[in-house]
Image: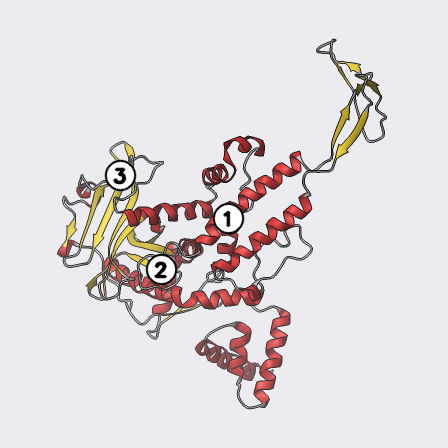
């Protein structure tokens, strides 16, 4: 076990979890910008210590991994719409999640889930000083947990241990929340290495909360206050190595840009040389009257005098590097990396005319919608579980009667541009003439809403047009 300090989150003893956690933490550092030391280590492995001295400072300005993940994490750019058949339930739950900031955290959750392949929410209800209850939402990175799977549904956890930084006494220390619903449910807080029980300090009961004291129930059954999201269902709790090529390629690309910066600084100009001559004349420096300097510019004429009996030679070497050609090669390499992370070439849009053209991974509008469609099934599963648990925890804390099942969610997605709306209308007119499309279909195409919402809105529009005789 690693030393327990606030700058060094703990590692577990299991070799698989160690490898998973260390790799996931590398990805998390890439997402959050704290990957300078990782790049330094990668440069040292690539070029060795002798050449490293000539490269200068490393360049972390081009982060291909974060760029690709950010392009894909667009499902929550527009706030989802919650619905339920019970009257007033959707409005009440919408108020609760908005006050708790659920959708404000959703963009961060999706980035972590796509980048690290899994991500988690942790939910609790907290009672404020005015006795009002409020939802607390916390995003948890998978490198901070270990988990045991359900035997029958192995991508669903039945036990989670989360490492958390807490104030223990007068100092911050790493602790471990351990929650399980396998058999008798329990919740306890331990020291990071598991040697000391801290449950009384943080849960108010020595040994933890067991059985009837366990605080988290949904639909009458004990549950975990976490919801595990998957970027892709694989039948396992974790799939941490998908897209390793992009992670490694991001570090390699940063090495190349560091080399490019060194070439611009040190090898992008012709190196002049002289044999058998030395500069003549000069001005004496104020600091040292025994030294002279010669100011030069493109319009000046330099004088030389022989320094030996050999025939004087003046010349220049060609630049050691072409920054334009080298930069374009690195940009092409970086752009190709996205293909190893689930982005198809048809989804990409180059930023023509921009200095970043060829480097930046930019999804076309259709590519954005394709990314959203691919993400919806995975995140819908997690979001519906989240809504059910939030409703259940709210009922337990307040005595409310929100339904704990039967929730539905709709993701509005990116709005159509004027050109895309015109194209959608033309396509609908052609289908309408063949008798295979209705106004509901057109409303759905233009506003990207569900059929139920489109029908309801068209009825409202028809009523208002009739009332105001338009």
Which mark identifies residue 425? none
Task: Examine the rendered structure and indicate whether residue 466 appears above or below residue 82.
Answer: below
Q: Residues within 10 Å of mark 2 (few under 14, many from 20)?
A: many
Q: Is residue 130 visible?
A: no
Q: Is residue 410 left or right of residue 336?
A: left
Q: Position of residue 63 (x, y in %)?
A: 52, 47
Work out which quarter of the rendered image holds the N terminus and state it.
top left
Residue farthest along the top direction in this orientation: 289
Q: State the SS at label 1.
A: helix
Q: Is residue 225 visible?
A: yes
Q: Position of residue 461 (x, y in %)?
A: 53, 79
Work out which quarter of the rendered image holds the C terminus and state it.
bottom right
Q: Residue at x 30, y 49 (%)?
A: 17
Mark 3 and mark 1: span between their CA atoms? 30 Å
- Residue closer to the observer: 287 or 437: 287
Q: State the SS at label 2.
A: strand
Q: Check disc 2 and report the residue beneath it.
A: 229
Q: Earlier in the sequence, mark 3 or mark 2?
A: 3
Q: Position of residue 375 (x, y in %)?
A: 44, 65
Task: Examine the rendered structure and indicate whether residue 293 appears above or below residue 125.
Answer: above
Nearer the viewer's eye, disc 2 or disc 1? 1
Q: Check disc 1 and report the residue beneath it.
A: 250
* Badge 3 vs badge 2, beta-carbon distance below 8 Å: no
Task: Examine the rendered structure and indicate whether residue 49 appears above or below residue 411.
Answer: above
Q: Residue at x 65, y 35 (%)?
A: 265
């Amino acid at each position: 076990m690693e030393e327990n300090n606030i700058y060094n989150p703990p590692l577990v003893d299991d070799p698989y979890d160690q490898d998973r956690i260390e790799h996931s933490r590398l990805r998390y550092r890439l997402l959050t910008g704290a990957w300078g030391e990782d790049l330094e280590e990668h440069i040292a492995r690539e070029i060795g210590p002798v050449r490293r001295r000539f490269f200068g400072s490393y360049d972390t300005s081009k982060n291909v991994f974060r760029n690709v993940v950010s392009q894909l994490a667009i499902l929550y750019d527009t706030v989802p719409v919650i619905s339920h058949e019970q009257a007033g339930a959707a409005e009440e739950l919408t108020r609760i999640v908005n006050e708790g900031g659920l959708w404000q955290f959703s963009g961060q959750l999706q980035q972590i889930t796509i980048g690290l392949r899994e991500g988690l929410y942790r939910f609790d209800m907290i009672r404020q000083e005015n006795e009002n209850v409020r939802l607390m939402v916390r995003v948890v990175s998978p490198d901070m947990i270990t988990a045991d799977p359900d035997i029958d549904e192995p991508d669903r956890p039945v036990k989670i241990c989360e490492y958390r930084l807490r104030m223990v006494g007068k100092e911050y220390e790493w602790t471990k929340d351990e929650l399980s619903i396998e058999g008798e449910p329990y919740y306890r807080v331990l020291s990071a290495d598991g040697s000391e029980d801290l449950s009384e300090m943080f849960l108010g009961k020595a040994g933890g909360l067991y059985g009837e004291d366990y605080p988290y129930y949904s639909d009458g059954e004990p549950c975990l206050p976490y919801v595990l999201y998957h970027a892709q269902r694989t039948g396992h709790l974790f799939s941490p190595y998908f897209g390793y090529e992009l992670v490694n390629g991001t570090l390699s690309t940063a090495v190349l840009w560091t080399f490019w910066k060194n070439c611009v600084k040190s090898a992008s100009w012709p190196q002049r040389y002289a044999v058998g001559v030395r500069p003549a004349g000069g001005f004496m420096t104020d600091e040292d009257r025994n030294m002279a300097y010669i100011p030069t510019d493109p319009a000046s004429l330099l004088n030389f005098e022989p320094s030996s009996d050999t025939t004087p030679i003046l010349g220049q070497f060609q630049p050691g590097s072409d920054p334009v050609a080298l930069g374009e090669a690195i940009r092409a390499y970086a752009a190709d990396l996205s293909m190893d992370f689930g982005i198809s070439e048809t989804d990409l849009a180059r930023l023509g005319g921009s200095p970043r053209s060829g480097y930046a991974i930019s999804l076309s509008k259709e590519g954005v919608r394709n990314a959203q469609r691919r993400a919806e099934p995975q995140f819908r599963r997690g979001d519906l579980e989240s809504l059910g648990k939030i409703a259940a925890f709210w009922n337990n804390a307040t005595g409310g009667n929100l339904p704990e099942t039967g929730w539905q969610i709709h993701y509005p997605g990116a709005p159509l541009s004027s050109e895309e709306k015109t194209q959608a209308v033309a396509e609908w007119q052609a289908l309408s003439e063949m008798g295979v499309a209705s106004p509901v279909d057109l409303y759905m195409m233009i506003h990207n809403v569900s059929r139920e919402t489109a029908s309801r809105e068209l009825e409202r529009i028809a009523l208002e047009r009739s009332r105001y005789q338009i």
